[in-house]
Amino acid sequence: MHTDTCLAVIPARGGSKRIPQKNIRLLGGKPLLAYAIQAALDSNLFREVIVSTDNEAIAAIATQLGAHVPFLRDANLADDVTPVSAVTADMLDKIDLLGQQYRYVCQLMPNCPLRTTSDIVDSHHQFLETGAKAQISVVRYGWQNPWWAMEMNEHQILAPVFKDFMTSRSQDLPALYCPTGAVWWIKADVLRKERSFHVPGKTGWEMPWQKGLDIDTEDDWALAEALLHLGFGKFCDAPV
């Protein structure tokens, strides 16, 4: 596919509360944002790698790292409740007004720093092969099996959520998958119309849970540092 057809959008607002300044905090000696930007640039799939942010400091660092920040995000799209899909759709709208029409959009969340260039390229191949309207990255649930989930009341009494599966062996249960924000693809026309990646018929691209890690808490951050030390999260599948 010609790179002129693909746009990468990296949403990175400045108002992170659980980990202040998360998107520019150093992980392995690099701003968290650097991992998404470099992986996208090194994939050679995109005409533009754009960071959507409401924060001037993030914009400056993103530009230094090689991404484009053509404008700052509107404040009404930088709160705690706006779906990230709406942010990416808004960026596509603004790019459309500049006369740059894309066929495909890839959304890369910076809080998933262990995704690699190969993950972007391989997910792109599957997306094109399936012809899906949208594709999101997922990781398979492991030993914390959702089929065995239980609720606990104020008296510590447990009740199974899926009581028919509580006595089943894990190997006899269907695999379940959890979305991760690492690599999401969508046809641009679909995003323009639906304003969301969550459209009927969307497909999943499975990746290892280690590379799909979402950083939302300090514990997540510590785990990312440990996995990075073990060799996960390489820009181009080479040591960082």
Image (cartoon, grey):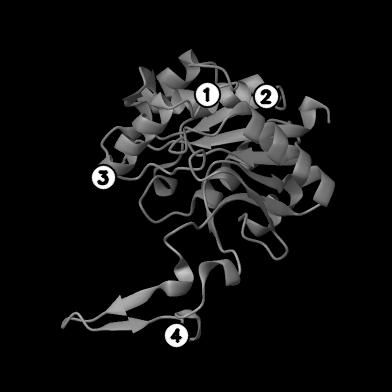
- Name of the residue lying farthest toward the left: 155
Query: The residue tagged with tag 2: helix, strand or loop?
Result: helix
Q: Is residue 234 above or below residue 202?
A: above
Residue 149 in sight here: yes
- Label 2, label 4: how many angstroms apart (C-alpha)? 45 Å
Between residue 177 and residue 75, name the one nearer to us.
177
Going by the numbered disc 4, the residue's amino acid type is Lys
Secondary structure under the numbered disc 4 in the rendered image = helix
- Which is more N-terminal, label 2 or label 3? 3
As drawn, the label of residue 18 is 3
Few, some or many C-alpha atoms within 10 Å of disc 4 (few <14, some 14-19, many ≥20)? few
Distance between mark 3 and mark 2 Cα atoms: 31 Å
Of circles 4 and 1, the one toward us is 4
Q: Amino acid at mark 3?
A: Arg
Whether tag 4 and tag 3 are in contact, CB under 8 A, the answer is no
Q: Earlier in the sequence, mark 4 or mark 1?
A: 4
Q: Is label 3 in a helix, a strand or a loop?
A: loop
Q: Nearer the viewer, mark 3 or mark 1?
A: 1
Mark drawn on residue 44 = none
**Distance of mark 4 from mark 1, alpha carbons?**
42 Å
Mark 3 crowd level (few <14, some 14–19, many ≥20, 10 Å Cα): few
- Residue picked out by circle 1: 234
Report the disc number at residue 43: 2
Density class for disc 2 (Cα within 10 Å; few <14, some 14-19, many ≥20) is some
- Disc nearer the start of the sequence (3/1): 3
Would you name the residue on which mark 4 appears?
Answer: 163
